Image (cartoon, rainbow, N blue to C red):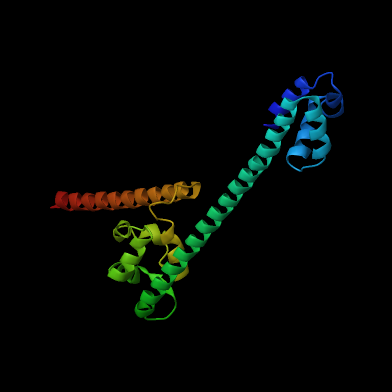
């Protein structure tokens, strides 16, 4: 915006007194318009000189004085809107985490027989059968049906999991979450564990079949 008007003023004020004072070079023109249009420095002198030179030049200065503050104001409003949106998202995320922690703590308190705040596989299966907790998780976009047959998605090979860690892991599996590099690595580990489990089962089955075949041959 300033560049366009700086070029116009430089060309229109060429070989004039006001041009030599304020718009001799393009950098001088932009400097004058920046401090006059955005910071309102030296406006009376500049306006008097431009109107004395030509009415069109004075009107062009008025356009700059009106548009520059609006442009700056729009930029500031955009920044403020972005900040408010980011803060709102962070507060909403904190509220969701706090809500899930409270609901899990309420349910788990009745199931934790040894009061160690650790969740094992049996307690995990019991939790997933409680309608109130399932509804609370679904309210924040977590589909618990994905974990009924695959508890390793939560425990990742561990035998127990702290309740706070359980909440954090569950929140990672919300449907609206975007995939990250960490998710790709987790998927890789899960696939490797599944392949190893299938390989072990296949090997054990083959060994059993081989033993049965040897017993039949002996008979």
For this view, does 164 lie left or right of residue 87?
left
For this view, does 65 lie left or right of residue 132?
right
Front position in the image: 174 or 148:
174
**Residue 12 percent across, percent down from the top left:** 76, 21
Front position in the image: 122 or 215:
122
Residue 130 visible somewhere in the drawing? no
In the depicted structure, whether residue 47 falls above or below residue 176:
above
Give the residue displayed 60% in from the left and 48% down from the top. 77
For this view, does 28 lie left or right of residue 96?
right
Judged from this view, the residue extending furthest toward the top is 15
**Residue 175 percent across, percent down from the top left:** 38, 52
Give the quarter of the figure containing the N terminus: top right
Give the residue displayed 42% in from the left and 81% down from the top. 115
In the depicted structure, whether residue 11 falls above or below residue 167:
above
Residue 154 visible somewhere in the drawing? yes
In the depicted structure, whether residue 94 falls above or below residue 51:
below
Q: Quadrant of residue 150?
A: bottom left
**Residue 80 percent across, percent down from the top left:** 60, 51
For this view, does 208 lie left or right of residue 42?
left
Q: How many marks?
A: 0
Front position in the image: 111 or 4:
4
Front position in the image: 1 or 131:
1
**Residue 13 percent across, percent down from the top left:** 79, 22
Judged from this view, the residue extending furthest toward the left is 219
Give the residue displayed 12% in from the left and 53% down from the top. 219
In the depicted structure, whether residue 25 falls above or below residue 185:
above
Give the residue displayed 30% in from the left and 50% down from the top. 203
């Amino acid at each position: 915006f300033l560049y366009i008007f700086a070029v116009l003023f430089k060309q229109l004020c060429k070989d004039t007194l006001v041009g030599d004072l304020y718009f001799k070079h393009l950098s001088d023109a932009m400097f004058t318009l920046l401090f006059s249009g955005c910071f309102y420095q030296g406006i009376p002198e500049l306006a008097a000189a431009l109107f004395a030179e030509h009415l069109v030049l004075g009107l062009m200065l008025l356009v700059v004085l009106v548009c520059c503050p609006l442009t700056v104001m729009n930029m500031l409003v955009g920044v403020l809107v972005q900040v408010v949106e980011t803060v709102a998202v962070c507060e909403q995320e904190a509220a969701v985490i706090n809500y899930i922690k409270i609901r899990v703590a309420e349910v788990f308190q009745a199931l934790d027989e040894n009061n160690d705040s650790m969740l094992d596989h049996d307690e995990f299966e019991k939790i997933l059968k409680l309608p109130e907790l399932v509804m609370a998780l679904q309210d924040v976009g977590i589909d618990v049906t994905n974990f009924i047959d695959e508890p390793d998605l939560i425990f990742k090979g561990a035998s127990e999991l702290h309740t706070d860690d359980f909440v954090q892991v569950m929140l990672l599996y919300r449907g609206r979450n975007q995939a990250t590099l960490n998710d790709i690595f987790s998927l890789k580990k899960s696939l490797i564990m599944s392949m190893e489990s299938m390989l072990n089962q296949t090997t054990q089955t083959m060994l059993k079949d081989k033993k049965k075949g040897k017993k039949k041959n002996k008979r």
